[in-house]
Image (spheres, rainbow, N blue to C red):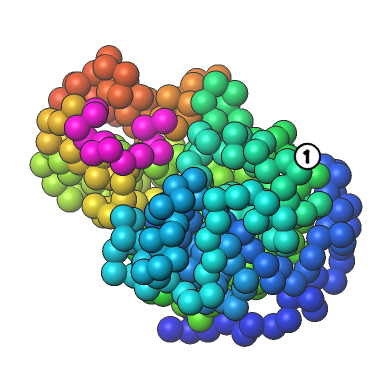
């Protein structure tokens, strides 16, 4: 368990070089203690992160739209819809009012990727000046082709975008099972301070300044998890799944290189680590969605009323790859299957029929 042994040093002492970034964020003006945290989104991931931050000793408020659901969580200390059986920390507070976020030193935004812009825009005038926005969704905005950090910078100038991503299931995190993720900000001292503030003995955060690499890994792996789910649902076997993970990772690295990501970031938790987790477990919504498709379900039936971020990210990633002349055949096969140009059998056949080539 040495991986999760973490000394909870004072965060005040962890930031030695406050500075003003090019985007206008005055890091020295941001609270370095991050004692008060607000979490947007009372689904499984938002609730899990709020519970973890409360365990870390922070004062945490979880914001959601559904007043009755939040009242039930306040009363039962359980999110019965998304995380049944998980006891919520006694100090965790709930609100439907954005006014309740004004005292937060940092905001964790756990709303879906395609809703990040609207959520960020709604925060104007309701959050402390300079409070960083920690993005906890994995995707690329449709239409604009903007990464999540770009969305936040455009919607909330003056608030540093931070990315939290890595191999993590909400249920594991909420229950306090050992998990390690990556937290990234352009100013690495900010990422480090936030990582210290959110860390618990079982939730470890590695910090980096490679913001782009972390968000690319999180977005692209969801698309590849759908492909692996399809293969498993179609009964293609473990060997096919392993090949898809390996070749999918090659696609992820090519796409990352074209977008300025560091190779070592993509080899880490937020890239390869997250890819391995989501491409081999039915706990992953994206894998489960693909598995149902592989079994012959239609798109609506396969989703089961749950959001699979990869289904929205696939066409955006494919469009960006074509614009950059990046070879991503697995991603593009998923795109074609989702928009009805290919069925499952044809999508699999198109990949197997590709010309023989060197592995690199």
From the viewer's perspective, is residue 282 above or below residue 244? below
Q: Nearer the viewer, residue 191 or 101?
A: 101
Whether residue 33 is in magenta: the answer is: no
Query: What residue is drawn where x is 51% and y is 64%?
Result: 50
Residue 81 x/y as whole percent: 31, 55
The residue singled out by tag 1 in the image is 157
Residue 53 x/y as whole percent: 55, 69
| Quarter of the image with the N terminus in it | bottom left
Mark 1, secondary structure of its residue: loop
Q: Which residues are magenta?
A: 299-312
Q: Nearer the viewer, residue 161 or 93?
A: 93
Assess disc 1: are there few (<14), some (14-19) or many (≥20) residues with their C-alpha within 10 Å of its C-alpha: some
From the viewer's perspective, is residue 77 above or below residue 146? below
Query: What residue is drawn where x is 41% and y is 63%?
Result: 73
| Quarter of the image with the C terminus in it | top left
Query: What residue is drawn where x is 31% and y is 46%?
Result: 285
Can residue 163 be seen in the rendering of this structure? no
Where is residue 168, by image quadrant? bottom left
Query: What residue is drawn where x is 35% and y is 46%?
Result: 246
Residue 337 x/y as whole percent: 27, 23
Question: What is the tally of numbered marks visible in this picture?
Answer: 1
Query: Which is the main secondary structure of the residues drawn in magenta?
Result: helix
Can residue 310 be seen in the rendering of this structure? yes
Residue 356 x/y as whole percent: 29, 29
Whether residue 309 is in magenta: the answer is: yes
């Amino acid at each position: 368990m040495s991986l999760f042994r973490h000394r909870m040093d004072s965060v005040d002492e962890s930031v030695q070089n406050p500075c003003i970034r090019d985007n206008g964020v005055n890091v020295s003006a941001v609270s370095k203690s991050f004692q008060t945290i607000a979490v947007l989104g009372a689904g499984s991931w938002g609730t899990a992160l709020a519970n973890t931050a409360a365990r870390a000793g922070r004062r945490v408020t979880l914001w959601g739209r559904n007043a009755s659901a939040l009242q039930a969580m306040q009363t039962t200390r359980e999110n019965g819809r998304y995380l049944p059986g998980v006891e919520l920390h006694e100090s965790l507070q709930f609100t439907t009012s954005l006014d309740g976020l004004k005292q937060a030193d940092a905001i964790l935004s756990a709303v879906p990727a395609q809703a990040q812009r609207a959520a960020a825009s709604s925060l104007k005038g309701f959050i402390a000046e300079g409070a960083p926005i920690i993005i906890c969704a994995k995707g690329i905005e449709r239409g604009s082709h903007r990464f999540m950090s770009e969305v936040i910078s455009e919607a909330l100038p003056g608030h540093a975008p931070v990315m939290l991503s890595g191999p993590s299931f909400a249920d594991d995190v909420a229950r306090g099972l050992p998990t390690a993720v990556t937290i990234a900000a352009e100013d690495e001292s900010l990422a480090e301070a936030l990582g210290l503030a959110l860390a618990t003995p079982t939730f470890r955060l590695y910090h980096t300044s490679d913001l782009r690499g972390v968000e690319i890994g999180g977005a692209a792996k969801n698309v590849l998890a759908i492909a692996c789910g399809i293969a498993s649902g179609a009964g293609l076997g473990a060997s096919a799944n392993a090949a898809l993970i390996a070749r999918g990772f090659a696609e992820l690295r090519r796409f990352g290189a074209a977008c300025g990501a560091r190779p070592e970031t993509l080899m880490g938790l937020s890239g390869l680590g997250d890819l391995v987790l989501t491409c081999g477990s039915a706990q992953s919504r994206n894998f489960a969605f693909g598995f149902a498709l592989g079994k012959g379900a239609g798109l609506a039936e396969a989703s089961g009323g749950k959001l699979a971020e990869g289904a929205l990210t696939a066409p955006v990633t494919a469009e960006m790859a074509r614009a950059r002349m990046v070879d991503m055949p697995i991603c593009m096969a998923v795109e074609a299957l989702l928009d009805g140009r290919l069925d499952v059998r044809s999508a699999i056949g198109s990949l197997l029929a590709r010309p023989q080539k060197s592995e690199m």
